[in-house]
């Protein structure tokens, strides 16, 4: 999973890191997620090709009493070598289906405005709320706007 994160960031995707990203830093970041996964605050799925991780998506559950109905899609990544195969859509659908099964009725996410990911989210029925200028630095360190999206997920039906 560290290799996926390195390849994604060094390939230009804005997922919270600056390039060049070292494998050791990526490995540490994934290891730090283990406690949230064990506690049920985060679920992560991976798309595999043998032993190679080609993509991941996470579903982050907030711990506030008034937010048990919602979750956030986080770190949807597909390695640059594996793009165009439908892995991103498949991972997104997996996370949406898991959210529905858990009784989540509202999902949200953010992504770099103008990124290829926006096409995926819009075509998958996500609604843009608006953009925040200069929200995050891209892998090259340039501040970019981020668009916030949401999607209602019926708790009684899967998204497929």
Image (cartoon, rainbow, N blue to C red):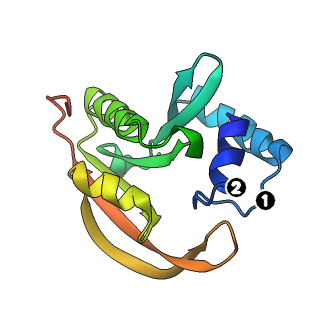
Relative depth, front residue between 24 and 35: 24
Residue 154: x and y in percent read 16, 38
Would you place residue 73 above or below residue 20 in this image? above
Residue 100: x and y in percent read 25, 32
Label 2 residue SS: helix
Relative depth, front residue between 140 and 126: 140
- Quarter in which the C terminus is drawn: top left
* Direction bottom: furthest residue: 133
Residue 130: x and y in percent read 32, 75
What residue sits right under mark 2 in the picture?
Answer: 10
Crowding around mark 1 (Cα neighbors within 10 Å: few <14, some 14 to 19, many 20+) is some
Would you place residue 37 above or below residue 112 in this image? above
Describe residue 120's horizontal placement relative to residue 88 as left or right: left
Relative depth, front residue between 149 and 6: 6
CA distance for labels 1 and 2 = 6 Å
Label 1 residue SS: loop
Describe residue 121's horizontal placement relative to residue 45 as left or right: left
Q: State which tag comes first along the sequence, 1 or 2.
A: 2
What residue appears at the point 53 percent right and 28 percent down from the top-left corner?
46
Q: Quadrant of residue 27?
A: top right
Q: Quadrant of residue 113?
A: bottom left
What residue appears at the point 49 percent right and 39 percent down from the top-left corner?
58
Residue 41 visible in rendering:
no
* Residue 20: image tag: 1
Asked if labels 2 and 1 touch by Cβ distance under 8 angstroms, the answer is yes
* Residue 30: image tag: none
Describe residue 147's horizontal placement relative to residue 48 as left or right: left
Residue 148: x and y in percent read 37, 66
Crowding around mark 2 (Cα neighbors within 10 Å: few <14, some 14 to 19, many 20+) is some
What residue appears at the point 55 percent right and 23 percent down from the top-left corner?
48
């Amino acid at each position: 999973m560290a290799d996926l994160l390195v390849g994604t960031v060094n390939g230009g995707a804005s997922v919270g890191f600056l390039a060049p990203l070292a494998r050791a830093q990526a490995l540490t970041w994934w290891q730090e997620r283990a406690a949230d996964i064990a506690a049920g605050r985060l679920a992560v799925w991976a798309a595999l090709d043998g032993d190679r991780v080609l993509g991941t998506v996470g579903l982050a559950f907030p711990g506030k009493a008034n937010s048990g109905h919602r979750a956030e899609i986080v770190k949807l990544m597909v390695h640059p070598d594996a793009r165009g195969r439908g892995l991103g859509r498949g991972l997104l659908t997996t996370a949406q289906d898991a959210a529905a099964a858990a009784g989540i009725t509202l999902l949200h996410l953010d992504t770099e405005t103008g990124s290829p990911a926006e096409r995926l989210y819009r075509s998958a029925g996500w609604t843009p709320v608006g953009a925040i200028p200069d929200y995050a630095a891209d892998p090259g360190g340039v501040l970019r706007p981020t668009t916030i999206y949401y999607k209602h997920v019926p708790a009684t039906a899967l998204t497929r």
